[in-house]
Image (cartoon, rainbow, N blue to C red):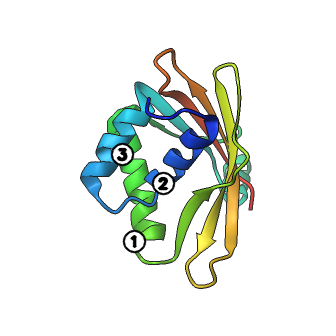
Amino acid sequence: MSYTTPQDLADRYSALWNEPDAEVRRRTVRELWHEDGEHVLQPPQEMRKTARELGFAEPELKARGHVELEARVRRAYEDFVAPGTMTFRAVQDAERLGNVVKFRWEAVLAETGEPGGGGLEFLVLAEDGRIAEDYQFIEN
């Protein structure tokens, strides 16, 4: 891994979601995540409510392995960053405990430059320092 502090990792992780170059995104996904790394997203409240109403347990959205992770990052870029709606940035609060790094991130609205949402990230690192498990909670 090419980071020296938990904040370096948080900043690099957040910058990936803003990256316009598909090849750089592909390479960065492979550098950040372990081969079978997983991104687990807690779905928005509305989606969780609908799933419960249909009789399902608490749903989770998952992307596993480099191909699925690349698709996840690409889709977020295409939906939010490319149209000029928002960019993503790490809050300067990253901490590491053992093999876990946690930090908050913000979705910055392009129109105002103000945060328009955000969340909490827990990254569980593999022995090689890459992300084995990535848990994302959307907070607002």
Say which element carries label 1. loop
Residue 37: percent from left, percent from top = 46, 28
Of residues 10 and 77, the one nearer the viewer is: 10
> Is there any visible trace of residue 57 in the rendered image?
yes
Number of the label disc, if any, that sits on residue 82: 1
Q: Residue at x 25, y 50 (%)?
A: 23
Pointer 1 or 3: first along the chain: 3
Disc 1 marks a residue whose amino acid type is Ala
Disc 3: which residue: 70
Of residues 74 and 128, the one nearer the viewer is: 128
For residue 44, what is the image quadrant?
Answer: bottom right
Pointer 3 or 2: first along the chain: 2
Pointer 2 or 1: first along the chain: 2
Of residues 62 and 29, the one nearer the viewer is: 29
Alpha-carbon distance for marks 3 and 2? 14 Å
Residue 55: percent from left, percent from top = 70, 43
Alpha-carbon distance for marks 1 and 3? 16 Å
Q: Residue at x 29, y 59 (%)?
A: 21
Q: Is residue 68 shown left or right of residue 13?
A: left
Quadrant including the N terminus: top left
Say which element carries label 3. helix
In this rendering, the count of numbered labels is 3
Q: Residue at x 38, y 40 (%)?
A: 29
> Is there any visible trace of residue 61 in the rendered image?
no
Quadrant including the C terminus: bottom right
Disc 2: which residue: 15
- Residue 40 to residue 113: above or below: above
Disc 2 marks a residue whose amino acid type is Ala
